[in-house]
Image: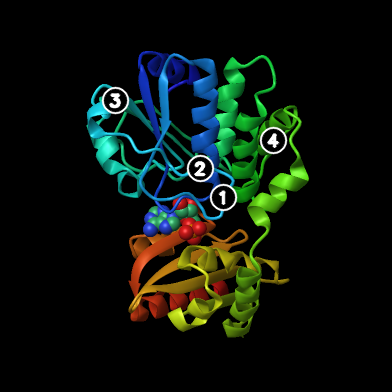
Amino acid sequence: MKSFDALLNKIEEYQTIIILRHIHPDYDALGAQYGLARWLQRRYPQKRIVASGHEPSIAPSFLPNPEEISLEDCVNALAIAVDTSNYSRIDGKDIWDTCKERMFFDHHVKGDSLTEYEYVDEHTASCSEIITDFIRTFEKEPVALEVAEPLYCGIISDSIRFSINTTTAYTLKMASYLLESQLDINKLNNQVFSMSVNLYRFSNHLREIANYDTKGFVYAIINKEDYVPYHVEAGPAKAKVNVFGEIRGIQTWAVFIEEEDGVYSASLRSHSMTISDIANQFGGGGHLCASGISKLSRSQCDEVIELLKQRVLG
Ligand code: AMP
């Protein structure tokens, strides 16, 4: 792992710096991407700093969609990927591949060793707090509001408002530093956690279709007919997995959502029990207590459910 000084020195070598995030970006990916991009734009107004990628940002979002950049302009550029250190999860692999050098900032279990310029700490709650720490190392004064806001949103999103075990004194210290920029906490919490009436009504439906048969374990299979009538997309519908974490005595919970016909994505969660190894068995990954799996068949969903059930029953 490189020091922040070594990483900033590398950034300073480049005239064009392209910041990428992971596929299906969440608020932590976007917060880290725009927080870093805006801070670099302000610090180095003579450089070209581009927050790029191909997928749209979360809709509706208070953050812009990524800026397109031609591959020609990437040839002499530095690429920085945030919130992933796993090549297969980068949104904009063509950009990443074309750039002259590459850098990672991430808080997942370390992925591919693709560059020596990386800062990966799986013990932090969010990538946004790593970017905050990076910025804070070189800033004497509070950062501009447009820098602090996305970073704070990333932190509260991945730590679920400082409520899950990954939250540490470091998380709160970084949030405290951002608060010096006069953030409107209430506004930012609403931006990240409020939802459309449709999504709210879908989350009630989700509670109804879940299976509560095993003590300490809840899961739901969400087929297209469960979410399409509510006019919600698969991504936000799957993110409602968090509703089950509120159940007293729950240890592990999961949702499986049908994306294409017969192909499911899963979100697995627990309060403290490791479940990432189960995700790994099916080609997924993430954090010890919050993992995802893509491209599961319906029968593989049943296999994952059985493994989670056995883990809870001990
Ligand atoms: P999700 O359940 O989609 O919110 O993902 C939980 C965590 O696992 C996030 O940190 C994701 O970045 C990560 N993740 C999700 N899907 C995958 C996957 N297929 N492979 C590796 N990591 C994943």
Ranked by sequence position, the earlier of labels 2 and 4 is 2
Instruction: Assign a secondary structure to mark 1.
Output: loop
Q: CA distance from mark 3 to mark 1?
A: 30 Å
Q: Position of residue 80 (x, y in %)?
A: 39, 31
In the image, 106 versus 79, the foreground residue is 79
Q: Position of residue 6 (x, y in %)?
A: 43, 16
- Label ID, residue 64: 2
Ranked by sequence position, the earlier of labels 3 and 1 is 1
Q: Label 4 is placed on what type of residue?
A: Ala
Instruction: Assign a secondary structure to mark 4.
Output: helix
Q: Label 2 is placed on what type of residue?
A: Pro
Q: Cβ of disc 2 within 8 Å of ligand 1? A: no
- Label ID, residue 38: none
User: At 51% from the left edge and 81% from the top edge, which residue is drawn?
Assistant: 226
- Label ID, residue 61: 1
| Quadrant of the image where one finds ligand 1 | bottom left
Does the CB distance between marks 2 and 3 fall below 8 Å?
no
- Residue on which disc 4 sits: 175
Q: CA distance from mark 1 to mark 2?
A: 7 Å
Q: CA distance from mark 2 to mark 3?
A: 26 Å
Instruction: Assign a secondary structure to mark 2.
Output: loop
- Residue on which disc 3 sits: 101
Q: Is residue 212 visible?
A: no
Give the mark toward the camera: 2 or 3: 2
Task: Decide: is 261 above or below 196.
Answer: below
Q: Position of residue 50 (x, y in %)?
A: 41, 30
Q: Cβ of disc 3 within 8 Å of ligand 1? A: no
Q: Quadrant of the rendered structure where residue 124 is?
A: top right
Does the CB distance between marks 2 and 4 fall below 8 Å?
no
123 with respect to 194 (left or right): left
Does the CB distance between marks 1 and 2 fall below 8 Å?
yes
Give the mark toward the camera: 2 or 4: 2
